[in-house]
Image (cartoon, rainbow, N blue to C red):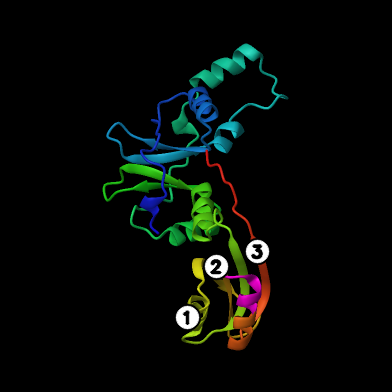
Amino acid sequence: MLVKERMNAPAVTITPEIPFQDALKLMREKGYRRLPVVNRSGELVGIVSERDLLYATPSPASSLSIWELNYLLSQLQVREIMTKHVVTTTMDTPIEDAAEVMATRKIGGLPVVDENNYVLGVITETDIFKALVEMMAMHQSGVRLTLDVPERMGVLGELTTGIAALGGNIMGVGVYDSDILNHRRLLVKVQGVTKGQLVDMLETLGDRVLDAREVGQTDLVFV
């Protein structure tokens, strides 16, 4: 799965000259948490988040009058608040690479740019979560298995062959680290076979079943 398959496009952008109050109003009306900032040619020059804008709001302890505060805020432009050194990604970047960048840099979203630094879209942590949900077939009922298996060639092939022999259909697979040396954890979603049949088959293969449960369809509404 690539970034272009999950990014929000076209991206909603603003210019550096837009007043701070207008940017904050746009974010609140549309439910955005960040906006790429582009110049008149459409090139990315910065990014501003809702947090940046809220931090720019004067403290209630300010000694300025409400009229003075409103005047100062009306003069404040996005260029004075935005982050100028923006971490970006491209449409053809694997989604897991984008997720790693966001997790490592503690960034909630990345502008997606082309070779000329024009903004094509935005991918956010919410988009990553939706992709994870889809890859694990959360909207499908079936049997959810968590296995601890040795890290050796052919393990996944043995598992899929065994499931197919039972008439099962694999809906989703995930792999993550085990706390046992030279082992891996597998998360598998299967349809068309019972939990008991799967556990019996896996025990004959020597795989350690950490968790096995029948799960129903999850109804998800994305907005």
Q: Mark 3 points at which residue?
A: 214
Disc 2 marks which residue? Answer: 190
Magenta segment: 192-199
Left or right, 78 with respect to 202, comes to left
Question: Circle 1 — which element?
Answer: helix
Q: In this picture, is 181 found above or below 187?
A: below
The residue labelled by disc 1 is 161
Instruction: Say whether disc 1 or disc 2 marks the residue closer to the N-terminus.
Output: 1
Q: Do the residues labelled 3 and 2 touch (CB within 8 Å)?
A: no
Residue placed at 64% from the left, 60% from the top? 215
In the rendered structure, does residue 14 fall within the stretch colored magenta? Answer: no
Crowd around label 2: few <14 · some 14–19 · many ≥20 (10 Å) = many
Between 112 and 74, the one lying in front of the other is 112
Q: Quadrant of residue 15?
A: top left
What's the amino acid at mark 3? Glu
Image point (66%, 75%), residue name: 196
Can see residue 108? no
